[in-house]
Image: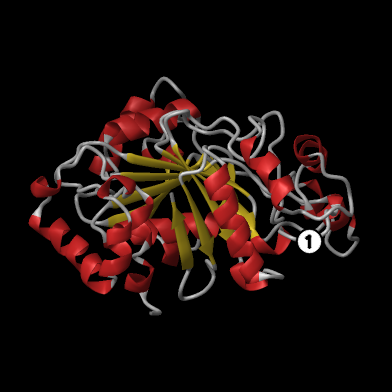
Amino acid sequence: MSDLLSEFTIPLMFKIMQTNKSNLSAEYKKSIQRLLSFNKATFNKASVASVCIKDPEVNNTTITISIVGAGGKTHLSYWLANFFKQLGHRVAITTTTKMYLPDKTHFDHILELDNIYETQINNTDIEKLTPQLFCHKQATSAPSTSFLYKNKLPEQPINKRDDLNAETKANTKVKKKADPKTKVKGLSLQQIENLRDSTLFSVLIIEADGANHLTIKAPAAHEPCIAQCSDIVMAITGADAIFSQADRTKIHRWSEFADITHCNESMTIDQAVLKRLINNPLGMFKGSPRQSKKIWVINKGDLSSDPEALLVLANNLLNEEPILTSVWLTQLNSTTAIQKVLIK
């Protein structure tokens, strides 16, 4: 099961939003029938209410997904974008912070919003966004993926970047070298809300914090920057961090992490530590809308020191933590990205 259909057990991840199954369009019914025929037993284990597949022809709303955490946010957002495109959606990825400008091969359209209507966008003129995008024919009724950003950021020497740790910045070989990748600025929360309300896209995926290229983190005071219109918040953690000894150089926002989890250096990042990270209001799902579904994604399963114990831990925390809707075990850089989906 190496192709995309092999990963369609994860449509069980979401609910059908404002959709009666009998009202689905013919094309969309075919998509769901493909899922049922591929893995009918798995599909039937979850109620339709736990699936967030929305028929673009029936619903005039936008599924909004915010992604936080550490250990593969960008991989996850790209995977979700392609997944929803396969189901007939018009998908947009953006950020409320900063991201690297993706390669053109990853998206059907890459749109710098400042250039679209030749003025600096702000919170008051975002309503111009929708007609301008329509005029550019960049977003149509056809299934597509688009990457949206406000503008490109000036190049910075690597040692000046705010997303790298002190060790990397101090490296004399790279500290004055310009970053070869282009970083871009995302949209404000108000712009995200207005873009969602425009229903120009049927799925909106938002990266809502940074992680300094590390695989576990706690949020700082100013983060995450989650849109309150988010239907789903997905928090990602690297499996390689779980069961490892806590090391301040490998944990983003170490001070916050230690305060929230009561974890000291050299302690094992075990179920008790992760439980506190998940259920603390300042922890993994900090700032998430009350009504949103919360999904914990444990990525890099191939790097886990104990895959069997990891599965037990994931099941235990899903059952113990009311905030969690689902837990995914993933390997997002592989052909079978979604290894297992746990649902209450």
* Position in image of residue 268 (x %, y %): 81, 55
**Of residues 322 and 107, the one drawn nearer to the viewer in this rendering:** 322
Q: Is 24 drawn above or below residue 262 in the view shown?
A: below
Relative to 30, 279 lies left or right:
right
For the residue carrying disc 1, how many other residues have a C-alpha within 10 Å: few (<14), some (14-19), or many (20+)? some
Q: Quadrant of the N terminus?
A: bottom left
Along the viewing direction, whichever of 129 and 219 lies nearer the viewer: 219
Q: Secondary structure at mark 1?
A: loop
Q: What is the basis of the colouring in this image?
A: secondary structure
The answer to which image quadrant residue 128 occupies is top left
Q: Please, is residue 275 above or below residue 270 in the view?
A: above
Which residue is at the far bottom?
1
> Can I make out residue 184 in this image?
no
Q: Give percent across and percent down for residue 344.
A: 43, 49
Q: Disc 1 residue type? A: Ser
Q: Residue at x 79, y 59 (%)?
A: 177
Image location of residue 297, percent across then percent down = 54, 54
Residue located farthest toward the top when viewing the structure as drawn: 124
138 lies left or right of 295 = left
Q: Residue 203, how many percent across, how many down?
A: 33, 46
Q: Is residue 282 left or right of residue 33?
A: right
* Figure check: 49 above or below 117: below
Determine the residue positioned at 15% across, 43% down: 20
Would residue 247 be visible to someone looking at this image? Answer: yes
Q: Residue at x 69, y 40 (%)?
A: 276
Q: How many marks?
A: 1
Vertical relation: 47 (above or below) 233:
below
Q: Residue at x 24, y 47 (%)?
A: 54
- Residue wearing tag 1: 244
Q: Is 157 on the left-hand or right-hand side of 192?
A: right
